[in-house]
Amino acid sequence: MTLSHRQTFPFRIWFLATLVFLPFEFSNDPVRGQTNEVLIGVAGPLSGPYEKYGASMRAGTSLAVDDINAAGGLLGATVRMVEFDDRCDVDDATDLAEEIVEAGVSLLVGHFCSGVSMPASEVCADEGIVEITPASSNPRLTINRSGPTIFRSYGRDDDQGIVVANYIADRFPGARVFVVQIANAYGDFILDTAETTFATRGIAVEDWLEYDPKMGSPSSTIRKLISERADVIYVVGYTEDTAEFVAEAREAGLQGTIIGTDSLMTVEFWDLAGPAAEGLLFAAHPSISLNTSALALVSRLDTLGVTDLEYAAFAYAAVQEYAAAALASGSTEADKVAEKLQAETFETVIGPIRFDEQGDLTVEFWGIYRHTNGTFEPVADTHWNWMR
């Protein structure tokens, strides 16, 4: 769907305004592919169980590309989006990355799943492609950074554990704290940093419990929590598994405060957990709908029927970051763009963005939310100082 000129004109002016400090100019530097065209690839799950997230990334990337072209292009060249369906399939990640290289993209906005982003980043780094993921949260992507052209405009899982542990220490002094990991690799990094933070804050966790939903129900774990009079239960697991745990725990009479992870940042959690979702706390990324600088983009995404606004906005911001860095360097060559991305702060639809030496965001990313009345909202004292 293409928006009318009337619908998009004010936002395109805003997009140009965010880059006004970097003058548009023509460049004789060759770009990947054709000299009069800059290709931006978006790679994510465009089919399969995570399709809606890939569609969100594609929508954000497409709108950003449209706005760049409406503002005159990039360094005198037209920008064109090329999409790639990775299906979150780790086994095909390297082969797909080779297809992306062959397509001649200068920027890759992707991937969604960390398991695909990591092998793809090796190929992108080797082949001189800037990759900015708007969704992958596994710390290994940047801890073991494949090269200086790899960036993440999203939060890291290990930082999430720090935020939750500090929140528990601040809000529940003297509470009997338990941790439940619903068997998955996703929780390892979260709990490593949570454990360190608990120790630093003087919180003695009563027990670290784990169960595998493939092996049966969480009933024995829940009975233990009830018998041990758990006050706070930090549950680390995927959406469906956590919903099953919460529903069964509340039905069994578990009264303690339950805190989950960013996998719960979806209204679909209510469909899965039912009334047991009421009052549940969880850590998650900033809500774009609360960001005043993103209101115009949110309106356009609503018109397009995009429901997962955050990944669309992060993808849009990734294109903005790349375009601003290209303008600042006067080139679309990967090393020159990466140097500017690493060194400067850029205004984006989600606020000012700056990367650290590993290619991660320098801003505080995670906050605490509460499920209530069929939706979710940030707790009163959660704020993100980089969002306007």
Image (cartoon, rainbow, N blue to C red):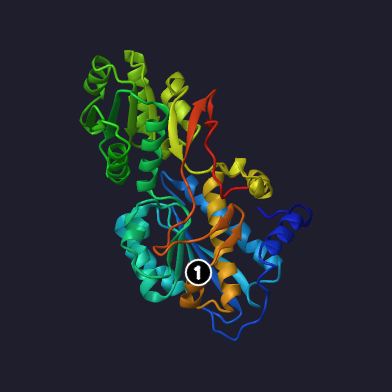
Name the amino acid type tagged 1: Ala
**Number of numbered discs overlaid on the protein picture:** 1
Residue at 48% over, 51% down: 54
Residue 357 quadrant: bottom left
Task: Name the residue nearer the viewer: 230 or 57.
Answer: 230
Residue 283 placement (x, y as % from top left): 43, 37
Residue at 47% over, 26% down: 270
Horizontal relation, residue 269 to residue 209: left or right:
right
Residue 334 placement (x, y as % from top left): 47, 75
In this picture, is 130 found above or below 305?
Answer: below
Task: Name the residue nearer the viewer: 104 or 282.
Answer: 282
Task: Name the residue nearer the viewer: 139 or 119.
Answer: 139
In this picture, is 265 found above or below 90?
Answer: above
Can residue 105 be seen in this snapshot? no
Residue 100 placement (x, y as % from top left): 43, 68
Residue at 65% over, 49% down: 293
In this picture, is 345 found above or below 163?
Answer: below
